[in-house]
Image (cartoon, rainbow, N blue to C red):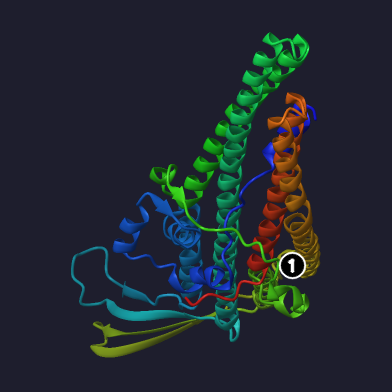
Amino acid sequence: MTQKLFLNDLSCLGVVAALLSGHIAAAPRGSHELRPSEDRQAGGPELSLERALRLALNNNPQLQASVARKEAASGRAVQARAWPNPELELSCEDMPVSHSRGSQSKNMAGITQVLPYPGKKKTDAQIGAADAAAGAAAWRLHRVELVREVKIAYCQVQTAERAGVVASELIEVAATAATAAAKRNLAGEIPLQEQLRAEILLGQIRTEKITAAREAAVARHELARLLGRPDLSAAQLTSSPDESGKLTLVKVDPAALLAGHPAMVAARARRDQAQATLRRAGLEPLPDVKVGVAAGRDEAANENIVAFRLSIPLPLFDRNRGKQQEAQAALREAEADMLATRHDLLAAWHAALASYQAAAAQVALHRENILPKCDQALRLVQSGFDEGKFGVIDLLDIQRTTAEATLAYQKKLFELNSARAELESMAEAPPAN
């Protein structure tokens, strides 16, 4: 088997990480608020998948920024319901300018208030509420995606580290084989080229170990980045992979399930906001009434006086046609986006489901058939090598074949758990606020 093929297998191997069963997936929904004592405990040398999820939900800076955007949208919703402030007016009329006496003036103090046309503030509140709903759904979507990314990154770390373990085991075997080949060559039992071949294979496997170490370091730093805790880049991962291939989500109706997906919730909120914006654009030309009332005294007549004011804009030139056209186009865009989101989610669900079912079948085949036969073949060749029935190259070949079968199993296990993470992310229930 060529070095390139083995490197390809090594890159995708791994004791794939631990996507714990249903109670782990549900933990972030009820425990994303991390207490300080838990945070200190999480900083220890061991890191389970459940703890990694809690840390990410509590410390990831991108998620914290999403929380801030959600709160900003809620603030806009509150502001949209507010009425304009009244205005205090003070006036002094008919004051003589030829002298400083004010006994001939009319002095007034009053309040002026804009009264929006009926329906405008209600529509503004609907726009604000839809904006807040979209912001909350965007935050929830970011949180769901972060959980999925942490699960996959956790897998990638264990996969890369398993590649290093396999390479170390192969180095031990290859070193033993190279030593034996050198002794047999000195004894005249094998030609020099067989010894050189064993030594070349040993050098190749050592380079693969270096590659695996680099990939493990990169994967660890990526996981620590998602957690928002660079200090945990060297933590020991303790969770175990799911090898059962049994997930109740595979029997769920995706159409009903995905209706509550945060991407769909956000799309519906944007559609609702576009509908309210269109209604608001239709109301905009209708005039807001400005009402004022003032009281004072006419010094010349020595009388108390009251004044009333009413101002109504005349929508003669600006009928807001351009804004209405823009709002209609935005509504069509939002409706199309909602339909596209539904189709995308269904396609992603079916793709993840197909991947999960295929990987589950392949994992079972490797575990129950291929790996036991590889172990049996390895024992036979090892025994024959010790008895002199097989050569060094035969031993190296069966060791490499066994290692590649192990790596192929880990690759399928990684695909199984990655597909599970995708399905769980799309089935995430709405979290409690």
| Residue corresponding to mark 1 | 334
Report the label total: 1
Q: Residues within 10 Å of mark 1 (few under 14, many from 20)?
A: many
- Which of the image's four quarters has the N terminus? top right
Q: Is residue 401 visible?
A: yes
Percent x, y for residue 111?
A: 36, 80
Residue beneath the point at 59% across and 51% down: 155
Label 1, secondary structure: give it: helix
Percent x, y for residue 255?
A: 77, 77
Percent x, y for residue 293?
A: 39, 85
Quick check: 212 above or below 187? below
Residue beneath the point at 41% across and 48% down: 229
Pick the residue in front: 57 or 421: 421
Which image quadrant is residue 302 in?
bottom left
Percent x, y for residue 404?
A: 73, 40
Quick check: 138 above or below 191? below
Pick the residue in front: 152 or 135: 152
153 with respect to 233 (left or right): right
Residue beneath the point at 51% across and 50% down: 226
146 with respect to 397 (left or right): left
224 with respect to 209 (left or right): left
Q: At label 1, which amino acid type do we have? A: Ala
Residue furthest left as drawn: 101
Residue beneath the point at 67% across and 66% down: 244
Residue furthest front as drawn: 387
Q: Is residue 278 visible?
A: no
Pick the residue in front: 381 or 69: 381
87 with respect to 297 (left or right): right
Which image quadrant is residue 317 in?
bottom right
